[in-house]
Image (cartoon, rainbow, N blue to C red):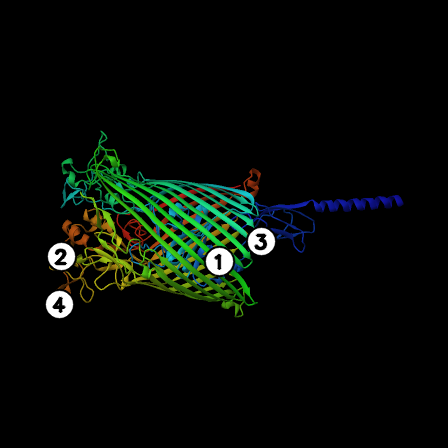
């Protein structure tokens, strides 16, 4: 009995020991990631109701031993919602954590001088674009990446490789010389150059989108007040990626893109080369007879454009510890254009590091080097070869531009050489423009915290670039049959130095006081040397030494700005906010008596949701805000005195240019008022931000003609004012949120009304520097639209009816100074949808523009030579124009309906129709599928075996769909890239088409 009892006890103890051992052997592992499938390092995993748990490693992986009765795991991470998972029989549990939308109220955004602020404390409109949204469109230029994603931004791109893009925030505030109305670009706290030289060398193209962590858009004077005159048009605060403490991370990626034009320009395919209905081989025009059935018709336009191919390679490595971090990246971009013999190649590298010398003393440094080469057309954006493509007669094979012996084949007989037009293929092959850019963007900063609430920061920045351009024109090129060489060397440098003292301190139990005082110094230097060599001595040798004569022009422009500023913010219980700023600038481009100017701002905000009872599951946050601000702007360098230029004639010496100086200039001044409201619903799953603004810029610094008695033609002076009024709406909805499925919707909508309020009485309009065509001009008209188009118009009676002359044709005005329309859209809308299903992500953006006009000067040019599509329907028909005729006297008119029939022949279309700008002003409405991107992240269990933490495959379509009433190629057009500022937007004069394309990519992380 005792023996059996002892055996039973032994077996019972053995069973208990086995059971305990079995419980200890239950193991669960997995990976914790965010909604972008990026690993969350240090996420907590604990057994519910216990302290038993673990944290994820550098790759988001975890492993945890469980007892049999431990059945529920709790996953949590700061800033993310906590989730629970039933263990059951699973040994692998992968979890996706979602952002805690309620905590968005505590999110910080990067503002002026890289100062981080709580989003809820900001009393003016700002918008932040995250890295994933910058990369999703697969654009090569970061400016184009923002299309449709920023309320109040008007962005115009171009289809040429390496081409510049233009961005305007809240319209345009100045018609002044030297103002292109684009915002300030700030990278990691230092201002950089975003100008364009000779319609190329776009500065936005220099930055690598894969290096960008975020872009904060400061839209108005209130948001950008601390930057002063530098950010009179707002600012893009660009933050690049940095190293993080922990395990070294390596990321590689590559993509391959294929591009074609979005559309083609319609051409008539009924009439062959000739004049007045007869064939004529001595003309390039297409006013001849109809094509015979056996006569070939060449599709020269579609054959001309090629499939552009882009290869983009990215590599970066980052890592560090609790004291030192490092980030290094390299990018190679190789792009061939849709236009033959055009390409763009760029290499860039970014090295960035930080180090804590002590717990309260740290320093950082970054070095970004960019080198690029761009081979492009003689005229990058307008006129030139593109008009020749559109006007070339379809009875001739344009691609056949060489004779069998390799010599140039002319379209016209050789004896008619003065009337020859250059074949576009021959022109591009023999007249290239090549520019090279070498650029350094360097930044050093040091930060010291002597007290917990006090921070001292110093930042030194240098943006230095060298731009070299060479343009050649071959012998026998139209307009310059002797050949020429043009070379430009331009060195640009921006040196900036900022010192800031920041405080953030509690005052009692109710108030928090934060603020910054500081000083800023910026020096801009531009040195350029341009040499034109005319008349080639030996054909085919494009050297300045091989030209008969040389004309040399050099310039040295310098501008210094010194400023002091202060920013004070008072916070009451996180409910009410009051913010006051002030800045005083001293500018070297203004006369001593006017070179110091002060501008303040004040803003206030109230989080009213903290004061009223709310159901957080319905209405979770509400804030109203208001601001008032002023900001000034100075003149261009050398505006105070006449500029001397070398005399190229015998005897040498110097002479005055045609522009007189003005020693009495004063700064422009913009006054801005802004009201806004922020509303969050359903635990912040729906978020609305709406803003109304009203801006007035006075004392415009403009150039206008003066009396010849002054000895000059043009003088710079203060006159005129510009207003901008509008609203912006940003709506974000987390429509569906499940463990394996998400749907997010983002809507950006804006309206702006830019008006040139006043000009001097003797000026009927202000013509922009660029955008002047035979069809019309880009102008600003007093009391009318800032983005106006003026030109020849029809003459109307008091009832608005078109007046028909005795010849049966509509009468037209005698001058081009007639307001025709507004190039600014009534509304811009961007609608983004993002879906996630397990490891698949799909996002697409629709871009809408409602209202606004485009001047189709390309169509006017084609009409003049008989290539316009409408000639198929209207040429040589009998037609009665809608309008009225005066059967009375000029003093007592009697209007009757026109019944006179006329023939619409070659003379009518060339002389009458083509000369009236109204005929070529078209609606610019569009609906465009800006991009659609599909990505797939391979499961972690597949990758762990080969040492890869993440592998993503992507496919992106860009501009795949376009719906527009515009008859040209694309209503998104800018005749001079970003060089012309606001003046060229909406002017289509031989513009290179926008591109649609497909991009396939792969990214891996180790």
Tell whether label 3 touches label 1 (CB within 8 Å). Answer: no
Image quadrant where one finds the N terminus = top right
As drawn, is 198 to the left or to the right of 9? Answer: left
Q: Mark 4 — residue?
A: 894
Measuring from the top left, give residue 920's x and y in whole percent: 23, 54
Q: SS class of the residue under badge 2?
A: loop
Comparing labels 2 and 3, the label whose residue is closer to the camera: 3
Task: Kindly give the residue lying farthest to the top in the view shown.
Answer: 405
Q: Mark 1 — residue?
A: 501
Q: SS class of the residue under badge 3?
A: loop
Q: Residues within 10 Å of mark 2 (few under 14, many from 20)?
A: some
As drawn, is 39 to the left or to the right of 483? Answer: right
Tell whether label 3 touches label 4 (CB within 8 Å). Answer: no
- Which numbered marker is on residue 843? none
- How far apart are the two marked residues, 2 and 4, measured between alpha carbons? 20 Å
Comparing labels 4 and 3, the label whose residue is closer to the camera: 3
Q: SS class of the residue under badge 4?
A: loop
Comparing labels 1 and 4, the label whose residue is closer to the camera: 1
Q: Mark 2 — residue?
A: 901
Q: Is residue 140 visible?
A: no
Measuring from the top left, give residue 877's x and y in whole percent: 16, 52
Which of the pair 673/12 is nearer the observer? 673
């Amino acid at each position: 009995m005792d023996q059996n009892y002892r055996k039973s006890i032994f077996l019972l103890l053995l069973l208990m020991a086995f059971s305990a051992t079995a419980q200890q052997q239950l193991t669960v592992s997995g990976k914790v990631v965010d909604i972008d499938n990026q690993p969350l390092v240090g996420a907590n995993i604990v057994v519910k109701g216990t302290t038993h748990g673990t944290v994820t490693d550098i790759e988001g992986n975890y492993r945890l031993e469980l007892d049999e009765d431990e059945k529920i795991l709790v996953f949590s991470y700061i800033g993310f919602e906590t989730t629970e998972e039933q263990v059951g029989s699973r040994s692998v549990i992968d979890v996706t954590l979602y952002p805690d939308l309620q905590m968005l109220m505590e999110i910080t955004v990067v503002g002026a001088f890289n100062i981080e602020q709580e989003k809820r404390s900001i009393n003016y409109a700002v918008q932040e674009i995250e890295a994933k949204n910058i990369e999703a469109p697969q654009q090569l230029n970061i400016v184009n990446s923002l299309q449709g994603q920023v309320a109040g931004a008007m962005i115009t791109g171009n289809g040429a490789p390496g081409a510049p893009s233009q961005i305007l925030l809240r319209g345009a505030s100045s018609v002044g010389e030297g103002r292109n109305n684009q915002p300030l670009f700030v990278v990691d706290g230092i201002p950089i150059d975003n100008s364009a030289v000779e319609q190329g060398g776009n500065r936005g193209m220099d930055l690598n989108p894969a290096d960008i962590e975020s872009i904060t858009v400061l839209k108005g004077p209130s948001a950008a007040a601390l930057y002063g005159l530098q950010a009179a048009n707002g600012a893009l605060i660009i933050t690049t990626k940095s190293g993080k403490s922990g395990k070294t991370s390596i990321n590689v990626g590559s993509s391959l893109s294929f591009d074609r034009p979005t559309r083609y320009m319609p051409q008539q395919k009924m009439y062959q080369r000739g004049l007045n209905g007869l064939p004529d081989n001595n003309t390039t025009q297409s006013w001849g007879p109809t094509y015979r059935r056996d006569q070939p018709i060449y599709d020269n336009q579609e054959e001309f454009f090629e499939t552009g191919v882009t290869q983009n390679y990215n590599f970066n490595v980052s890592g560090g510890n609790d004291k030192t971090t490092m980030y290094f990246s390299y990018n190679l971009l190789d792009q061939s254009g849709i236009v033959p013999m055009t390409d763009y190649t760029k290499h860039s590298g970014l090295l960035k590091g930080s180090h804590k010398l002590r717990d309260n003393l740290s320093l950082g440094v970054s070095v970004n080097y960019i080198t690029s080469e761009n081979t492009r057309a003689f005229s990058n954006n307008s006129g030139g070869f593109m008009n020749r493509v559109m006007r070339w007669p379809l009875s001739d094979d344009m691609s056949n531009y060489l004779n069998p012996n390799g010599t140039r084949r002319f379209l016209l007989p050789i004896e008619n050489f003065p009337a020859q037009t250059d074949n576009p293929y021959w022109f591009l092959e023999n007249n290239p423009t090549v520019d090279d850019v070498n650029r350094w963007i360097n930044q050093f900063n040091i930060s010291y915290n002597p007290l917990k609430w006090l921070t001292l920061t110093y930042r030194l920045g240098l943006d230095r670039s060298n731009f070299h351009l060479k343009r050649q024109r071959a012998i026998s090129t139209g307009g310059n049959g002797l050949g020429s060489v043009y070379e430009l060397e331009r060195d640009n440098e921006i040196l900036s130095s900022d010192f800031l003292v920041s405080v953030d301190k509690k005052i009692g139990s109710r108030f928090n006081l934060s603020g910054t005082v500081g000083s800023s110094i910026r020096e801009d230097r531009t040195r350029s040397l341009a040499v034109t060599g005319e008349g080639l001595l030996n054909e085919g040798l494009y050297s300045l030494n091989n030209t008969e004569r040389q004309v040399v022009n050099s310039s040295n422009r310098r501008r210094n700005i010194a400023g002091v500023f202060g920013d004070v913010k008072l916070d009451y219980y996180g409910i009410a906010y009051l913010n006051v700023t002030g800045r005083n600038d001293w500018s070297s481009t203004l006369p001593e008596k006017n070179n110091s100017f002060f501008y303040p701002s004040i803003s206030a905000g109230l989080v009213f949701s903290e004061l009223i009872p709310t159901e957080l599951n319905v209405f979770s946050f509400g804030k109203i805000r208001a601001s008032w601000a002023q900001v000034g702007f100075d003149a261009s360098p050398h505006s105070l005195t006449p500029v001397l230029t070398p005399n190229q004639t015998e005897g040498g010496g110097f002479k005055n240019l045609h522009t007189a100086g003005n020693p009495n200039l004063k700064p422009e001044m913009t006054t801005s008022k802004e009201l806004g409201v922020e509303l969050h619903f359903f635990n912040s799953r729906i978020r609305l931000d709406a803003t109304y603004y009203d801006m007035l810029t006075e004392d415009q610094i403009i150039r206008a003609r003066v009396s010849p008695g002054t000895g000059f033609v043009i003088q710079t002076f203060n006159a005129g004012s510009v207003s901008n009024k509008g609203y912006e709406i940003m709506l974000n909805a987390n429509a569906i949120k499940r463990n394996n499925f998400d749907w997010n919707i983002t809507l950006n909508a804006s309206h702006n009304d830019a008006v040139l309020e006043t000009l001097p009485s003797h000026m009927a309009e202000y013509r922009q520097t660029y955008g002047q065509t035979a069809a019309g001009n880009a102008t600003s008209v007093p009391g009318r639209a800032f983005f106006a188009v003026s030109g020849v118009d029809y003459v109307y009676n008091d009832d608005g009816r078109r007046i028909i002359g005795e010849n049966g044709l509509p009468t037209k005005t005698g001058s081009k100074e007639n307001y025709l329309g507004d190039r600014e859209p009534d509304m811009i809308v961007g609608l983004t949808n993002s879906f996630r299903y397990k490891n698949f992500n799909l996002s697409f953006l629709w871009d809408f523009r409602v209202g606004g006009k485009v001047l189709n000067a390309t169509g006017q040019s084609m009409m003049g030579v008989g290539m316009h599509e409408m000639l198929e329907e209207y040429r040589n028909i009998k037609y009665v124009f809608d309008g009225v005729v005066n059967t009375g006297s000029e003093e007592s008119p009697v209007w009757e309906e026109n019944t006179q029939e006329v023939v619409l022949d070659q003379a009518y279309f060339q002389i009458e129709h083509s000369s009236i700008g109204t005929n070529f002003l078209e609606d610019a409405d569009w609906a465009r599928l800006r991009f659609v991107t599909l990505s797939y992240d391979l499961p972690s269990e597949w990758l762990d075996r080969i040492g890869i933490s993440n592998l993503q495959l992507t496919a992106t379509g860009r501009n795949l769909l376009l719906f527009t009433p515009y008859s040209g190629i694309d209503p998104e057009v800018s005749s001079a890239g970003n060089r012309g500022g606001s003046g060229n937007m909406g002017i289509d004069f031989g513009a290179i088409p926008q591109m649609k394309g497909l991009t396939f990519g792969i990214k891996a992380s180790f």
